[in-house]
Image: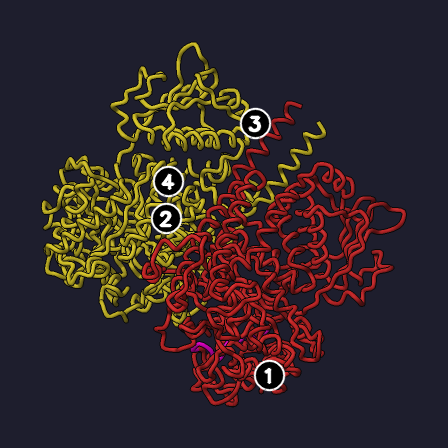
Chain colours: A red, B yellow
Amino acid sequence: MKKNILFFIFLAFSSAALAEDGYRLWLRYDKIDNSILLQQYRNLINSFVTDGSSPTLRVAKKELLTGLQGLLGKKISEATGIKNNSVILFTKSSSRMETKGVNYDKLGDEGFAIFSLKGNIKNVIAITANTDIGVLYGVFYFLRLVQTQRPISDLNITSSPKLKIRILNHWDNLNRTVERGYAGFSIWNWHTLPGYIDQRYIDYARANASVGINATVLTNVNANATILTQPWLEKVKALADVFRPYGIKVYLTARFSAPIEIGKLKTADPLDDSVQSWWKEKAKEIYSIIPDFGGFLVKANSEGQPGPQDYKRNHADGANMLADALAPFKGIVMWRSFVYNPGSNDRFKQAYEEFQPLDGKFRKNVMVQVKNGPIDFQPREPFSPLFGATPQTPLMMEFQLTQEYLGQGTHLVYEVPMFKEVLRADTYAKGKGSTVEKVIDGSLYDHDLNGIAGVSNIGNDINWCGHPFAQANWYALGRLSWDYDLSSEQIADEWIKQTFTNNKNAAAVIKNIMLHSHEALVNYMTPIGLTHIMYNGHHYGPMPWGNTLHRPDWNPVYYHRADSTGIGFDRTEKGTNALAQYKPEVRTQFEDINKCPDEYLLWFHHASWDHPMKTGRTLWNELCYKYYTGVDTVRSFQQQWNRLEKYIDEARFTQVKQLLNIQVNDAIWWRNACLLYFQTFSKRPIPAPYEQPDKTLDYYKSIRILFAPGN
Amino acid sequence: MKKNILFFIFLAFSSAALAEDGYRLWLRYDKIDNSILLQQYRNLINSFVTDGSSPTLRVAKKELLTGLQGLLGKKISEATGIKNNSVILFTKSSSRMETKGVNYDKLGDEGFAIFSLKGNIKNVIAITANTDIGVLYGVFYFLRLVQTQRPISDLNITSSPKLKIRILNHWDNLNRTVERGYAGFSIWNWHTLPGYIDQRYIDYARANASVGINATVLTNVNANATILTQPWLEKVKALADVFRPYGIKVYLTARFSAPIEIGKLKTADPLDDSVQSWWKEKAKEIYSIIPDFGGFLVKANSEGQPGPQDYKRNHADGANMLADALAPFKGIVMWRSFVYNPGSNDRFKQAYEEFQPLDGKFRKNVMVQVKNGPIDFQPREPFSPLFGATPQTPLMMEFQLTQEYLGQGTHLVYEVPMFKEVLRADTYAKGKGSTVEKVIDGSLYDHDLNGIAGVSNIGNDINWCGHPFAQANWYALGRLSWDYDLSSEQIADEWIKQTFTNNKNAAAVIKNIMLHSHEALVNYMTPIGLTHIMYNGHHYGPMPWGNTLHRPDWNPVYYHRADSTGIGFDRTEKGTNALAQYKPEVRTQFEDINKCPDEYLLWFHHASWDHPMKTGRTLWNELCYKYYTGVDTVRSFQQQWNRLEKYIDEARFTQVKQLLNIQVNDAIWWRNACLLYFQTFSKRPIPAPYEQPDKTLDYYKSIRILFAPGN
């Protein structure tokens, strides 16, 4: 017994010495801290059996073993036959195993079933699928059940993904800087590839597979053609080889002018024969190196990127040329709709204006990838009017996990409520119920190609995402694109229990913070439909006064249009009429200034400072209320977090505490800078009893953030 | 007993799940794996007592506790009075503790004594010093004894540093890129400072203090003046506050043109009153924020950096202006001698030509920081002729830990043998025995200011230094500058036991690899005194044919001078007469082509291809022999490493294995490219039975390394 105590003590110290650095993400597999439950789980599982030895089944087995042995704190042995108290992994095609009662047709290529086997042998949990990757997904699902301390004694689960392509977009440059990256630098160490396989690559694949992400674009949409040269394709191949067992396909960004830059052609005109041949040869070369290469993501004719319009061709011409090159190998093109050449009278309208008329012109293996809102990853945007507007063109959703306009690496913002606002929005494209979800899952217009992309928030920080809570957004991208019916609460709950604690009280507090975090940010940054008033360039901090960039739509004043009469962007018929891009049922929700929901008011209307809001306050007073509420909410996060000290490891407790302190200070900076600036137009006081700003507008205007990350 | 076994098993799994990622460096504190020894240590230590509660003693206590509890796997309690089996920490000034018999005068400001107390109370280990930091150094020394499994029952140790300033130079830019950084990006996350204190900053301080490093220059010598502005000084202060308890002073690089760039002056002329005043005010400001600020490191009039010569002033004028500004606050200037403006007929001679005549012109608080060799961190250089040539000017040694020309992040190179070649070299400045060591420790010319700088190899890679073995060079910089009498073997031995294993056989194999690694690199890169034949710019890989840069001394052909008659740079009287910069006793070692040591031959002579080497081979055959030997040695490292699989954790075993594979391939690339190229002049065959290059010279010339790190 004395020795036992020694071991207990040793464990305590060894875990203290190895601080919780966040590297393990939500796959921590620490021993279950509930001793009764632990004993129950231990009684239920002694061994496992796998049928088959493909690379994917090997990693499934390894993960099951690592996970269960960590969680249960005991050795799990591999058995050759089914015994009492075991977990069995098998695919439909394996004849040795029990497959009766499983509706394999329903599972598809990636789904799985987990069920408790009935019969003479007791306590057998079967994880099965049509495919090896389905089994791996099932293993991760099962480990999640144990890690979140759910019952496992009478299981009957089937699950398959609602979307086909569940993909991360890395805006990673070849020199390892990351555009809009706030978690260090790129995890792709191109210099040491292909010879050196960093353990990170394997753990990246594990993390993605654990939430169902099955694809990744390795390179920045502001692309460099070098990645398409042979020595670099060998590096890409090394990553593809690591990812393949985890069901993850590799994609690259294609620089439209690559035929000139690395192909020595004189043109990149998509209708030019030599250009078409060059891409065909390039595709052939790529597939000879990476046989399951996914395809290309393309940003063209946007923000200085080359594209088909350079040759007076349109987006379809460009996309189709690449699609034709990839088609023989089953590759696809994801062509981004994020364009805003200075032509329209409203940046809001430009993606729709360029892409909607091209509906029907794209090849079958092209998807158009659309940002959730019409502008650019703002704290709150209405859904992009493109959703539902292209019956013949499958549209992918592009969400941003990296928090470019959302506090970047230092603010705690759980993005799922924001994602779900858009997914649940009704486009009325085919009448009521034509939600954005149904547009992007292909069901509304019967498209086979479909997917969700998340612009990655991953970097080489030890904990991958910089802010410990930013991991939740990566996690959520996978879970949501597998099943968008999961609620914000469910996803938060799962993530918290795996990542922080199963303690009910502590988990509830953390969840409460997460679920209110997005609205808090909207309030202290851009309430009531304000948008794009961040600092030029790096987008960190407020700059509502910004009016010096040469393109009007790069300036904050373009977006808020504050003047002595009021504030906001009139997108009704009297204004730019951008609302006309929505279906009438949507338009009517927004076009009447007295009916428009408060949170979208300034997106669509230039409203008087005294405009009566739904709360009964005037617009100015509501603006003040929202900004102050935003700050207060973050202060309440601090108080709530401080109560968690005894439930959270010291390392992450301190980390989050420091970051919340930065967030409060930033929120005050936002509030004071914006209100002082808008007050120069409204000429109205900040109502009592709010604490008045303690610094001047000139002070806030003088703040410079030099060497901001991700810029 | 059953439960006991369960715990054993759990430990095994938990350590497997937490892979050895290298983050803990040599401060791993894992439980002693020798059970007999473990029991002995456990019997000897139960508790500890500290006297005093300064921040430094608090961290000393915390480190002692973390270290001992980890190593011994048991709880160590804090006692208020001295008991049997305890460790006591105290300074001379504390009256409560036993100080008899300690010669405190000998310990100085940073030294310590560790001894076993004699008397009634048994097994008491005393760690004492004049200062709190001395106690901390003593704690780290003591923990090293335990971690390397040395006896601790009858201790009588005193130790104090041979050099005063033991400093890292970070070539870290404010955007977090690191010039010549091969371990990711800068660990200084300026954006989140001062609000966010990364645990890395604390662990950086711990690691440095553990080896006696007491100073750090945070910023690149190619400097940016922004760091000297108030918001950035607040960030620097936050780091200085973290480092202070660990005895580490912060220094910054001073951009010479800062008065123009951030001070809005029209000039940076060091003799201009307004410039002098500006720096005095700036110094005052810095010290008001960071009261123990160390001073400035300056690179001026070198490689495009601004400097006093821009105003027709000399280095002393520039250094003295800064020194005068810092003097009231006891700050110092470290002024680099790394200059090579195109004036001399030999880059070798330039630092000496510019600095030797200024001897006697520098203020008392200026040191000139001199790279070990006359050119630039080449695999092997003779010592810089400046050493010993400036009796009135203290010279600091500048070593490079980051392996710019030494295989960078992918080659295993233990640099201590190279450092010691230089430290042990005799300058004959005051007759025989005037070693470089005695120049830089101040003893030769009785200078009070003295130090060694190491250009840092630290980045934000999880394991800090990229290559697991690169940590050894950081470790060694501290240990050597504390005590340059430590041998390469001793330092390697200590580091291996703390970092990898105390297993004698495995440690011997690792040590053997380390001790031969530098010579292997010299052989496959630049044998027989070849120098600077690396690729332009990024310096990764061979480019002996390089002749296209506009400055002759940026081109490899400038350095090797191969032609049909032979190869090498004639620095005798018949050549550039650079040898005249050395004392006659040194000169005579090198100037006779028939007496010059083989390893320096081509540094000083243009030798015929048939020149007879000391080995009996011709020069050409010796060149072939060396290149082939270099490759073979790395191959032998692979074989030796592979035998260690069962002694080393899987993560690092695999890491090093992959890196050695890259190193072998790179060594072959170097060998083949250089021999094929030099063969175009020598017209001689690569002797049988060497394997002939399997690719052509044109192939090697076509290799391009794009986006190389650190460039």
Q: Residue B51 or B386: which is nearer the viewer?
A: B51
Q: Earlier in the sequence, mark 4 or mark 2?
A: 4
Residue located beneath label 4 in the image: B208
Badge nearest the viewer, 2 or 3 = 3
Front-lying residue, B52 or A662: A662
Percent across and percent down for residue A710 are 43, 63
Q: CA distance from mark 2 to mark 1?
A: 53 Å
> Is residue B411 something that shows in the picture?
no
Residue B518 has which mark? 2
Q: Are marks 2 and 3 on the same chain?
A: yes
Q: Chain of mark 2?
A: B
Instruction: Tell which of A571 and B476 is nearer to you.
Output: A571
Q: Which residues are magenta?
A: A295-304
Label 1 crowd bin: few (<14), some (14–19), many (20+), radius 10 Å: many
Label 3 Cα neighbours within 10 Å, binned few <14 / some 14-19 / many ≥20 = few
**Mark 3 or mark 4, earlier in chain:** 3
